[in-house]
Image (cartoon, rainbow, N blue to C red):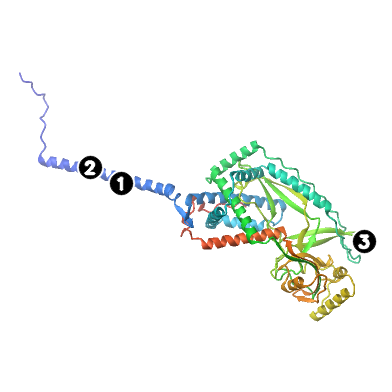
Amino acid sequence: MAKRKKRGEEPERELTRKETRLQARERERHRKLYLGVGSALALALVIVVAGLVYSFAYVPNSTLATVGGEPIITKDFWQRMRLDRSRLQGQLVNMMQLQQQFGQQFFASQINQIQAQLQSPFALGVQVLDEMIDEKIVAREAAKRGITVSDDEVEEALREEIAQGRNAVTGPQATSTAEAGVNATATAAEWTPTATPTIDASLALTATATPMPTPEPPAARPILSDTGYTEGLTQLEETLSSLNTVNLAQYKEVIRARLLADKLQKAIGEEKVQPTEEQVHARHILISVMTPTVGISDTAAITAPVTVTNTTTNTTTNTTTNTTGTPTETSAVTATNGVSATTTVTATAPVTSSAPSATEAVTVTSPVTNEVAAAPEVLTVTAPVTTASEISGTGEITTSNAVTSTNALTATTVLTESTPPAHETVERTDAEAKAFAEELRQRILNGEDFATLAKEYSDDPGSGAQGGDLGWFGHGKMVTEFDAVAFSLPIGEISEPIKTQFGYHIIEVLEKDENKPKDPNQLQQEESQAYTTWLQEQKTATEITRPDDLTARLPRDLRQVPAIPN
């Protein structure tokens, strides 16, 4: 018996052909829509991924510059820029604190220079790129010469930096300091003081001289322990990581490059610079024409080295205690090599009458070369090269002055309005000055003492007080006319009056040496200049490519000018 269909149920209706076509079209539209949206999303994802790969993989590993076909990789350049910026920021803070502590403008030029570098990311980038190019050239030349830096040397240099940041010294540094102290003591014991000048009792004395206090030696710094070194390395690694700069292994390579450059500079300096030169030991009497108004800012100093004995070397140790957990810093502030400096040497001189004793200030400066003179300036100081303790950190600075005896200091006196001679200068015309110089020469030939006449009549305030003694000097240290006579005059012969822009000179050569060792500072300066010249020649001869738009290749985080501390 057949089942009945439920009431209300209607049989399924077959779709018409038109309805079938419409449903098919709707499904096709949806399929195309889904396909389009999916394709767009996939394309966007590809673009994003490509951008990320380009920014974080391709660009960092791309070649920024080449040196003789050898690449400089962009990410290495970025890391070095961050390292140098952090070093400059640390130096700026230290310089400002030193300036506030001493209340002087000794550090003004350094502060301005560092601020200018920090305010120009492009300038900092150019400097860092130049450094990396130099390192490539140095590495190639060192390899040719077989010059290397061992891992032990790198470790020792790093240990010294860690010790500096912890206000300590390494074992070798402690030994070297002890030996230097022994040598300084021996030098001081052998020193024989020269006679002090006699002051005319008729001169007005404005104050009674106060004896100079004897500075107390600084406390000896402790030797860095292995534990301290390990802790310092840990702090350094944390600091480098927080700055997104080089890691510890790369930092060691930066140190290696610096040590390699030092070794190559020494080798090139010894190769290109003679350690000895022809020198003469002479004295003179200067009779100026009219009132001496020529300053060292526009003419050369005629008087070259004057020996100032029993001098002291002041080393200012600046200890920065970091309050942010990064390495602390101890930086030695020393005079820049080759920079002329003005030093005041105070000697207490007896008075020939019952007048109270007085302190006579004698100003001396470094030698100048040929006819180009060095202007008197404040002693310039520089901070050490990049060290672990300079990367970052601020804090309180404490200062101690280490005073140690040294060998005799070679200095130069100059004729300026601000440095009057011991006697009252007489205004003379050219003819009068020449006639008086000839008169003094004749008196010397007749048997009068050269030194006595120099002290009484010479218008050179520095050498005159020393009996006209100029000490030893080489070619080019004096003005041309003086130099020519000094090196051609026989020993012991009194020259005719020689005319220079300072007036008339009577010269006597006391000694000559064709192979006298150069002053260590002079030799170091000449070796440094020889290395700089060689490096520039190598850069000119080497094919070097640089980016067309360095600004676009700077790391994004360094394109903005950082805030400069006040």
Sequence-wise first label, 3 or 1: 1
Q: Element under label 2?
A: helix
The residue nearer to you, when weighing 96 against 63, is 63
Give how far across and how far down residue 328 sits, in percent: 64, 43
| Count of numbered badges drawn on the protein | 3
Q: Measuring 81% from the left and 50% from the top, which residue is drawn there? A: 186
Q: Identify which amino acid the numbered label 2 is placed on.
A: Arg
Q: Is residue 143 left or right of residue 461?
A: left
Residue 284 is situated, as x and y percent measured from the top left of the image, at: 81, 70
Q: Residues within 10 Å of mark 1 (few under 14, many from 20)?
A: few
Does 162 sit left or right of 431 as displayed? Answer: left
Asked if the residue at tag 2 contacts the one at tag 3, i.e. Cβ–Cβ closer than 8 Å, the answer is no
Residue at numbered disc 2: 31
Q: Which mark is residue 40?
A: 1
At which x and y percent is residue 13? 10, 33
Residue at x 57%, y 56% (from the top left corner)? 117
Assess disc 2: are there few (<14), some (14-19) or many (≥20) residues with their C-alpha within 10 Å of its C-alpha.
Answer: few
Q: Which residue is mark 3?
A: 355
Q: Judge whether residue 136 can be spotted in this image.
A: yes
Q: Give the Cα distance between marks 3 and 2.
A: 115 Å
Q: Answer yes or no: do the residues labelled 2 and 1 have beta carbons within 8 Å?
A: no
Please indicate, yes or no, whether residue 393 appears anywhere in the rendered image.
Answer: no
Q: Amino acid at mark 1?
A: Ala
Lower position in the chain sequence, tag 2 or tag 1: 2
